[in-house]
Image (cartoon, rainbow, N blue to C red):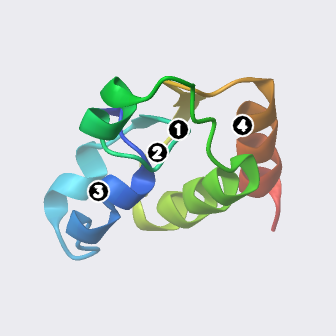
Amino acid sequence: MINCAHPTHFENVLDTEADWLRRIGGLRANASAKSHAELDASEALDDGDPLDLGRRYQALRKRLPQLSVLGGCCGTDHRHVAAICEACLAP
């Protein structure tokens, strides 16, 4: 499972030819694309872009064949979860 990181932090290492990708069954991404250091120094919560996060989940499901657990981590709320569901259910 990948947890507590925005997709922009790890998308570049997901080589679609790698066997280990089949071992990733879950994703709980942060809402914000800021680094952990930036978030630690922030005075306000950065809730990112729910629609963009949903689109990134949709793209990741195509690259990660076993991905079946979808959720959110830091900064996500019902808007993010709804956007993820809508994007992943779209044809």
* Residue at position x 55%, y 66% in the image: 59
Callouts 2 and 4 close, C-beta under 8 Å: no
- Residue 7 appears at what percent x and percent y? 42, 53
Helix or strand or loop: what does disc 3 sit on? Answer: loop
Q: CA distance from mark 1 to mark 3?
A: 18 Å
Residue 68 has which mark?
Answer: 1
In this figure, which residue is indicated by the disc labeled 2?
67
In this figure, which residue is indicated by the disc labeled 3?
10
Number of marks present in the image shown: 4
Residue 32 has which mark?
Answer: none
Helix or strand or loop: what does disc 4 sit on? Answer: helix
Q: CA distance from mark 2 to mark 4?
A: 18 Å
Residue 80 has which mark?
Answer: 4
Amino acid under label 2?
A: Leu
Callouts 1 and 2 close, C-beta under 8 Å: yes
Amino acid under label 3?
A: Phe
Q: Earlier in the sequence, mark 1 or mark 4?
A: 1
Q: CA distance from mark 3 to mark 2?
A: 15 Å
Please tell me whether residue 9 is drawn above or below residue 12 in the rendered image.
Answer: above
